[in-house]
Structures are given as structure tokens and as C-alpha cells.
Amino acid sequence: MECKKIALFASGSGSNVQNIIEYFFDNEQVIVDSVWSNNPSAYVLERASKFQVKTFVFGRDEFNNSNLVVEKLKERGVDFIVLAGFLWLIPSNLIQNFKIVNIHPALLPNYGGKGMYGMNVHKAVVENKETESGISIHFVNEKYDEGELIFQAKCPVLATDSPDDVANKIHELEHKHFPEVIEKVLKDRN
Ligand code: GAR
């Protein structure tokens, strides 16, 4: 496979970002080029810096109404974008220029759409007394959580589970599968 440069987008803690950086650390074919965030105080930026991965922060106007992010990504030779806990809708200029994958902490099409992210998802799953939840990895289009599905994995939700318990199970699934799925998508596209 030709060497691929990926950019990771995240808005919060960034445990998935760290896990992806660690997974590809010694990989000569897949390089984590940079980490991008809308949130200047997101912990993900510290995590990335610890691994000497370059970070960029952008504001809403720059992201939605300019070509700056697209231009910077192209300048850096980025081939592929991974959303790992990134909460803004992706504008069409990014979608037209890059393949983008997202991870969602539920079994889409259930519990997707605007406002359905992070703990909101797990609270809704527990409130509705679901007996299972899971993760969905999908290509990104211009609507929240509606692009083509690539991969899903499930976990049981027990009657005694709190939203935090579900979040922990989901993070475990994400850390186990997300890097491998990214690697496979990159290989298949070569
Ligand atoms: C992850 O569970 C991810 O699936 C979710 O945010 C969490 C980020 O955790 N993404 C969404 O809800 C997107 N709609 P992390 O910061 O520890 O990687």
C-alpha cells in the first residue's frame, strides 16, 4: 500500500485519538499527520502533543464559511480524515475533497442524528431499557450519522447498567475495533 497520511478530528477527551496514534505509531504505511479540534481546551490536544503529533484548532466561521481547513489539509498532503469524537456537522467542501469516516457510539440508524452524541446516546439507551448497544463506523456525508455503514459491533446492556457503564463498554469496543477498521478501509481503497 502507498503511504497514507491521516488527520484526526476530535472535540473532547480524545481516548480514541490516542488509541489510533498508538496503533499506527510504528506503521510506515499509515501516518497520523495531525489532530484537529474546534475546542481549544479539549484534552485531546494535550494527548496529541505528548506523542509529538501536530495540532490545529479552528473556529466555527473558519470551518463552515472558508476553505482554510481544506487548504491546510491539502498542503500537508493529508489523504484521509477520521472523526473520533468530533461533534460538528462536516461542511460540503471537506466532504467533496476527502474521504471521511466517523465513529458513532450506538447501533445506527438508532440513536443517531443531531444532539445524539457521547453521553446523550448512552443516557437514551438506558432510559429506553435497551438490551444491547454498540458502535457504528461509517463514511461521512452531509447529514449527521447517515453515510454508508462500514462496520458495527454490539455489546449487551444489562438492566443494572448506568449510562457510565454503557459508555465504558462502548469505549472498549471502539478502542478494540476502530484502528483496525481504519487500516482496512485504507487498504481496500488502494
Ligand atoms: C466516542 O464514544 C465517540 O463514539 C463519540 O464520542 C466519544 C468520544 O470519546 N462520538 C460521537 O458521539 C459522535 N456523534 P473519546 O473523546 O474518549 O474518544
Image: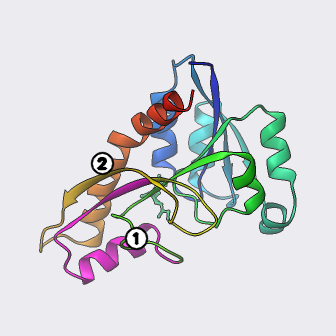
Residue in front for this viewpoint, 2 or 78:
2
Horizontal and vertical percent for residue 22?
47, 30
Residue in front for this viewpoint, 70 or 185:
185
Disc 1 within 8 angstroms of ligand 1 (CB): no
Q: Which mark is residue 119?
A: 1
Residue at the spot 20% in from the left edge and 75% down from the top edge: 130
In this figure, which residue is indicated by the disc labeled 2? Answer: 172
Q: Which mark is residue 3?
A: none
Q: Earlier in the sequence, mark 1 or mark 2?
A: 1
Judged from the image, the secondary structure of the residue bearing numbered disc 2 is helix
Residue at the spot 64% in from the left edge and 65% down from the top edge: 142
**Residue 157 against residue 20 in the figure, above or below:** below
**Residue 83 against residue 141 in the figure, above or below:** above
Identify the image quadrant of the C terminus. Answer: top right
Identify the image quadrant of the N terminus. Answer: top right
Q: How many marks?
A: 2
- Label 2 neighbour load within 10 Å: few <14, some 14-19, many 20+: few
Horizontal and vertical percent for residue 19?
45, 38
**Residue 155 against residue 120 in the figure, above or below:** above
| The magenta stretch spans residue 128 | yes
Residue 46, by quadrant, is top right
Point out the stretch of residues depicted in magenta.
Answer: 115-137
| The magenta stretch spans residue 94 | no
> Mark 1 and 2 residues: CB-CB less than 8 Å, in contact?
no
Amino acid on which the number 2 mark rests in the picture: Glu
Judged from the image, the secondary structure of the residue bearing numbered disc 1 is helix
Residue in front for this viewpoint, 55 or 122:
122
